[in-house]
Image: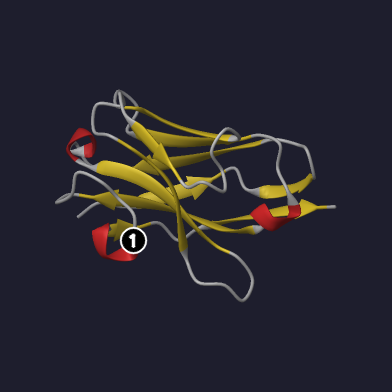
Amino acid sequence: QVQLVESGGGLVQAGGSLRLSCATSGSTFRSYLMGWFRQGPGKEREFVAHVSRSGSSTYYADSVKGRFTISRDNTKNTVYLQMNSLKPEDTAVYYCAAGARVLGMRTSSDVDYWGKGTLVTVSS
């Protein structure tokens, strides 16, 4: 069992930046593919980014490519999402996700564990 706890959400103006963190429990962090999803108001949950187990490979949704950066620190059992040039349409609850069985993460079916989410609100 893996527990994921997100932090770092909040209110920011358009064009601003936020850094989300996801701390995990257990000693098997490096065995999980890690990612971020988000769910905006009235929208379905959507994939944002994922990072490989070693941290050497990343993949982003087109909507955040060039603005967001995912990274992980396997010594701290933590994954990060640096969000720059934020837009009002980035407003959502952001969820940390862990996948044990997959080499990539695109949909909810690729996820074995979820965090409870952290709210990001971008004002115009």
Q: Who's the residue at 60% across and 65% down the image?
A: 40
On the image, the x and y values in percent for residue 49 come to 43, 44
- Quadrant of residue 25 within the rendered picture: top left
**Residue 110 appears in which quarter of the rendering?**
bottom left
* Element carrying mark 1: loop
User: Going 22% across and 42% down the picture, which residue do you hit?
Assistant: 32
Q: Is residue 114 left or right of residue 91?
A: left
User: Farthest residue toward the bottom?
Assistant: 42
Which is nearer the eye, 105 or 82?
A: 105
The residue positioned farthest toward the left in the image shown = 101
Residue 112 seen in this snapshot: no
Residue 35 position in % (x across, y down): 37, 46
Query: Which residue is identified by label 1?
Result: 107
Dot 1 alpha-carbon crowd within 10 angstroms: few under 14, some 14 to 19, many 20 or more? few
Residue drawn at (47%, 35%), measured in percent from left and top? 80
> For the residue marked with disc 1, what is the amino acid?
Thr
Up-down: is 4 above or below 114? above
When asked about the image quadrant of residue 59, the answer is: top left
The residue lying at 61 percent from left, 76 percent from top is 42
Would residue 37 be seen by someone viewing this image from the given angle?
yes
The x and y percentages for residue 60 are 44, 42
If the image is split into quadrants, where does the N terminus sit? bottom left
Q: Looking at the image, which is closer to me, 36 or 104?
A: 104
Picture coordinates of residue 108, whole percent (x, y): 33, 64
